[in-house]
């Protein structure tokens, strides 16, 4: 049996939110205060997550992405990865993180069987970072990237949210950083999560605008470069 949607497309990837808690308060994702998190008894245990994943694996799921909230605030996350790694049919396990807690955990995650890491990072400017996340933690993010590469993770991806009026000045520095460090960089569309009522369509910076800013700095890009 395969997982098919109503358009007949086969799905082989599963996203698993291991927690709804987070250690930052990015304005485009969460309000700054008065957040109601799930009661802890309602969060699935590692054993329950592994059991559900095994069912999906029998339906053709081969790739897993662990998300949150911030997944690294979940205690003993490498134990979950070890359990998921042993499930027959699972070929790849990836993690999306803000990297604040990554420096101390990178080696353990690698040893447990984690394959890939995506890091959410919108800026390399400390003050700008603090204004976006409402936390002064940029140094720890950069330390996390260093530790992950030292632990043997390759092809890491940086995800930056493309918000008009916020990201334009960061596009070139982030691109240079990614190239220098051997990272992949992706600009993500600003989505209407609207946690604090701030989203409007005018705030979405398009792929064509990002491409134009890059070409102004680096010259004509390869035609194969994606704009999305």
Image (cartoon, helix red, strand yellow):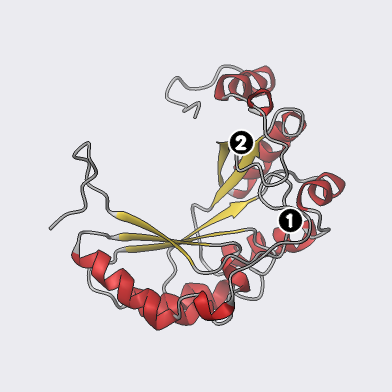
- Judge left or right: residue 55 versus residue 38: left
Q: Residue 105 falls in which quadrant of the image?
A: bottom right
Task: Tell me the number on the disc at residue 25.
Answer: 1
Up-down relation of residue 84 to residue 96 (above or below): below
Q: Which percent across, then down, holds residue 88? A: 23, 73
- Badge 2 vs badge 1, beta-carbon distance below 8 Å: no
User: In the image, what residue occupies the spot 69% across and 44% down?
Assistant: 28
Lateral position of residue 133 relative to residue 193, left or right: right
Residue 8: give x, y in percent of width and height. Answer: 18, 39
- In the rendered view, would you say 13 is above or below 210? below
Position in image of residue 210 (x %, y %): 62, 25
Mark number, residue 190: 2
Q: Secondary structure at mark 2?
A: loop
Q: Earlier in the sequence, mark 2 or mark 1?
A: 1
Q: Relative to 189, does residue 159 appear above or below in the rendering? A: below
Q: Quadrant of the N terminus?
A: bottom left
């Amino acid at each position: 049996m395969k997982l098919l949607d109503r358009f007949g497309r086969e799905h082989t990837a599963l996203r698993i939110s291991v927690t709804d808690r987070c250690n930052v308060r990015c304005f485009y994702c969460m309000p700054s205060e008065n957040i109601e998190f799930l009661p802890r008894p309602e969060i699935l245990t590692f054993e329950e997550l592994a059991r559900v994943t095994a069912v999906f694996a029998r339906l053709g799921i081969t790739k897993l992405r662990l998300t949150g909230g911030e997944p690294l605030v979940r205690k003993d996350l490498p134990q979950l990865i070890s359990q998921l790694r042993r499930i027959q049919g699972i070929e790849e396990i990836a993690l999306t993180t803000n990297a604040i807690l990554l420096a101390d955990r990178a080696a353990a995650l690698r040893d447990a069987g984690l394959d890939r890491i995506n890091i959410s990072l919108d800026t390399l400017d400390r003050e700008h970072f603090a204004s976006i996340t409402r936390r002064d933690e940029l140094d720890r993010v950069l330390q996390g990237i260093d530790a992950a590469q030292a632990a043997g993770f390759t092809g890491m991806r940086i995800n930056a949210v493309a918000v008009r009026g916020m990201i334009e000045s960061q596009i070139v520095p982030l691109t240079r950083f990614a190239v220098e460090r051997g990272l992949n960089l992706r600009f993500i569309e600003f989505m209407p999560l609207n946690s604090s009522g701030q989203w409007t369509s005018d705030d979405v910076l398009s792929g064509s605008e990002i491409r134009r800013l890059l070409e102004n700095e680096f010259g004509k890009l390869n035609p194969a470069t994606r704009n999305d």
